[in-house]
Structure formats: C-alpha cells, structure tokens
Amino acid sequence: MIVKGKAEQINNNVWKLERNGRYYSVKHYDSSSTLYKVNAIHEKLRSLSFPHIISVIPSEHPLLFTQPWLRKARAVNFKKRADRTESLEALIDLHETQSQFDWKTADYLHEYPLIAKWEDRLFRFESIREACEMYIGKAAVDDIIFYAESALRVVRKSYNQEKKITLLHGDVVHHNILRDKKGIIRFIDFDLACIGPAGTEIALWMHRVLPQIDYDLTFLLNEQPSLQKLDKSSLNLLLYPNEILREWLHFFSLSKDSQERQLKNMLPFTESALSHWPKLWYNVERIKN
C-alpha cells in the first residue's frame, strides 16, 4: 500500500492512516470488481440518505477504499439488549431501501447462494471430522453432521429464493456492525454484499445472536417483535448449525499456537450449542405450527 501519511496495520489488508492530524481507515482490495461493488453500494445508500454507513473518501489508487476512522466507535455486543435491538432495526432499514431502489437491477450484485454455501461448509467440515474428533469426540461430530444434514433436507424443500429480494449486507458478524460515539449504528465491510430474501439475512443475524442468549428463541422473539413476522422458509434456516461449522473450520485454519489459545473458547461453545440444539429445533417447529 502506497499512501501519504503514517500508517498502522490493523489486519491483513486494513490500515489506520494518520495524515495532517486526521485519521482514516484504508482497505486494500485484490479485486477491482469487489471495490467497484462496495463503492457503488455506498454511493447508492448515500443518495438514499441511509444513515447507517460511513462516508467514503475518494481515492486515486485503483484498489484502495478510504473512510474516516470512527474514533471511540465499538463493535456491537449481541449480549446487550440495546445492541441487539438497534442492530436489528438498522438491518431492517437496510433491507427496506428496496422500496426506494430496486437492487435487483444492480448488475454488480449476485444472488446469495445460501444452499450451495451451506452444502460446501458441511462438505469441508466432514473433511476435517477426524481432526475435530480429537478435540470433541466422535459422538459430538456425529451430532453436528446429523443436525446439518437434517436441516439441509428441510431447507432444500422450503427455501424461497425469490421472497422479498433486497440488498443483503452479506456478513452480519458483530465486528461489522459498529456503534459510533453518538450511538448511531454503522455497517462496515460490504465485501460480501449481494441480493437475496430479507428473511435470509435476518435469520443469519439470529444465528449470530442465539449463542449469546443461550439459544433461547422464545426469549428473542418476545424481545424483538419484528422477528415474529418471519416466514417458515426463514425460520427453517435456524435449524442449520452454521456457527458451529464455521467456527471449527476457522479453528483448523489457525496456527498451532492460535489453536491452543482458541481451544478454551471452542470447547464450551460447542458443548453449549449441542446441548441446546434439540430444544432450538423443537421451538422452531412449534413456532412454525
């Protein structure tokens, strides 16, 4: 990365840049098409007066994306009710921009390949099952695969790819949802943005939230009444053990030292998920009916 100023590397492709007393976030892209997409989304959302993004600073470099550095901003914490409520409201607001602009006409956005992505995730998990068994045992791995296969059978039958198509952020992990110093929710990192059913991304947000509230689906639906409007197709997505698969695949991508540090979180996370999954499945079926 070649820019004027003092740069501190934050991660593999993001820097905090100080120039003339001002601070910026600078991200380097390998793909000009992804950068074009991210720029185009921000420009369109800005034109729609969507408040939950950060402004973009034009860059002469063809692969750099620059925004003001949000000082005193923090990632949302899904353990906190206010962060759950306001991040969900902001996500719904993002989806509702479809009423102002037909995102299906944006040729830089592809459809979200949910089923293909989940089939691939399960396939990759099965390829590491023996290594995984060394940490959590064969029975636990069998349970994870059983829940995933069972959920996929349900999802393949019920998933409605065409229902309420809109812009999806694409990666609603907590660190991509910031609260600035004024308390406003801001989305960052639109690299995986695409189009798809609004209910799909709401369900993916719920996947991120449920581990933080002991997988208590009834509690979450009562706390967030807007979730009670979810259709059966979207509710069925909660049956797939997405976060367990994702976290173990990520675990085996780490160095040995990092794995040792992460293990103290992975084991209780997995045990908790598997102990709650039968009740979660029961609650999904009960709510649908």
Image (cartoon, rainbow, N blue to C red):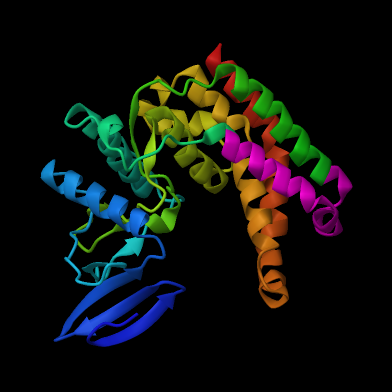
Q: Nearer the viewer, residue 135 or 151?
A: 151
Q: Is residue 61 above or below residue 130?
A: below
Residue 17 x %, y %: 27, 80
Residue 189 x %, y %: 36, 56
Visible residue check, residue 39: yes
Magenta residues (range):
116-140
The answer to which image quadrant residue 148 occupies is top right
Tell me the quarter of the image containing the C terminus.
top right
Tell me the quarter of the image containing the N terminus.
bottom left
The answer to which image quadrant residue 279 occupies is top right
Q: Main secondary structure of the magenta part?
A: helix
Question: Which residue corresponds to the image point at 60% horizontal and 46% vertical from the top-left?
Answer: 243
Q: Is residue 84 above or below residue 262?
A: above
Q: Nearer the viewer, residue 2 or 126?
A: 2
In the picture provided, is 279 more to the left or to the right than 69?
A: right
Question: Which residue corresponds to the image point at 61% horizontal and 22% vertical from the top-left?
Answer: 156
**Is residue 137 covered in magenta?**
yes
Q: Nearer the viewer, residue 61 or 273?
A: 61
How many marks overall? 0
**Is residue 139 covered in magenta?**
yes
Q: Nearer the viewer, residue 75 or 188?
A: 188
Residue 258 x %, y %: 66, 73
Q: Is residue 91 above or below residue 166?
A: below
Q: Is residue 235 above or below residue 75?
A: above
Question: Which residue corresponds to the image point at 22% horizontal and 53% vertical from the top-left?
Answer: 184
Extreme residue toward the top, this view: 289
Residue 142 x %, y %: 83, 40
